[in-house]
Image (tube, helix red, strand yellow):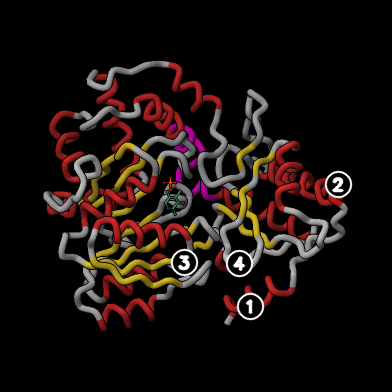
Amino acid sequence: MPSDTPTIEAPRLGEPYLLTPGPLTTSYEVKEAMLRDWGSWDDDFRAMTRKMRDQLLALLGDGGKDYDCVPIQGSGSYCVEAMLGSFVPRDGKVLVLANGAYGLRAAKTMEYLGRDFHLVNKGDYMPPRGDEVAKILAQDPAITHVLIIHCETSSGILNPVEELADAAHAAGRKVLIDSMSAFGAVPLDVSRVKYAAMVSSANKCIEGVPGFGFVIARKDEIEAAEGNSHSLSLDVHAQWATMEKTGQWRFTPPTHIVAAFLKALEGHAQEGGVAGRGGRYTRNRDVMVEGMRELGFETLLADRWLSPIIVTFFCPADPKFAFSRFYDLMKSKGFIIYPGKLTVVDSFRVGCIGQMDENIMRQVVEAARATLNEMGVETAAPPQAALDERKKLAA
Ligand SMILES: *Cc1c(COP(=O)(O)O)cnc(C)c1O
């Protein structure tokens, strides 16, 4: 298909595009799938749950036969908490590799769980590396698990997950992955990275609506997790055992959201699965980043670390630039962008995921150009402090 063929329908209700990392812009068919009610106990819905679990496991390829999929009600963080509480024994210890808000949230979760952890905090966006993980693991035999954030959505960095998992496995430790914003678009090959468990959610790269997440874990790990959990509702083993036995979720399932998610999985398969979806997001990113750079914007990260999920840009140095006005004017043109999460310099983020293609990304760049004009900003070049900050990454 020629790359400039429009493949994606504009939102039918005229709502703005969500250039955000979930909730994101979903297809009309996904929204339409929620018009029907389902009985949670009924065979039809049980079959839907089974199908969803099977289809998610199929995304792992051949290596997936040792794994099972356990959906959990709630947002993605509920799943992270369920994973940590269920797979880390009460006397276990987790090495949490953080370089942004989600890594820090995982550490906070460990605090709530009252289980031991060692936090490596790399700041806003520096990637944790395999050699430092190896060193820490050699020094601390109490560490049982290493938690890796696949794409740290707060900066958009794609962490070197294989390198980190290799370091953990070489030291005989288990790997847990928060692949919330990457699963379904960025490959994570189970024959390469033999993680004990990973989590993702309905409203990210599979392009469903928010309301549940899912844990994908080795079956032997799920079986061994019995009795570990601190929480009744977040017990992965108990949810799995009930689903295996009865086909049902333990407590009220998000029926409409599961129906929408099955529709979203159909779209994912039609697009060519992980490779097809990742390809579209990568083109979205490339077109958008190239256009924004032409306007003078600079990315926080060097190309090597840019994910196809979300990109952080420095705010322009020009005193006429104000993020809130930029946001409002972009919204009036049909695009909702995302504030930045860096602590040192001002920034904003533009997501590449959801129902949009490179044609839409060209419109995003045009909207940014028009908005800068309206604001009287001559160039989007960032302040020197931002560029100095970025130099750290290259060091
Ligand atoms: C979205 C996301 C989460 C979960 O966030 P919720 O607000 O609970 O959905 C966790 N980790 C990462 C990396 C994410 O992108």
**Relative vertical location of residue 117 with respect to residue 179 in this rendering, above or below:** below
Q: Give the residue displayed 29% in from the left and 60% down from the top.
A: 110
Query: Which label was assigned to residue 99?
Result: 3
State the residue in front, 280 or 143: 143
Residue at mark 1: 391
Q: Nearer the viewer, mark 3 or mark 4?
A: 3
Mark 4 neighbour density, 10 Å: few (under 14) some (14–19) many (20 or more): many
State the separation of the CA atoms marked 1 and 4: 10 Å
Residue at mark 2: 374
- The stretch of residues the image draws in magenta is 266-278
For mark 4, give the secondary structure. Answer: loop
For mark 2, give the secondary structure. Answer: helix
Mark 1 neighbour density, 10 Å: few (under 14) some (14–19) many (20 or more): few
Mark 2 residue type: Glu
Query: Which label was assigned to residue 5?
Result: none
Residue 270 visible (yes or no)? yes
Mark 4 residue type: Leu
State the separation of the CA atoms marked 1 and 2: 32 Å
Q: Give the residue displayed 51% in from the left and 39% down from the top.
A: 23
Q: Residue 240 sits in which quadrant? A: top left
The percent position of residue 5, horizontal first and vertical second, equals 69, 37
The mark that comes first in sequence, 3 or 2, is 3
**Relative vertical location of residue 126 with respect to residue 222 in this rendering, above or below:** below
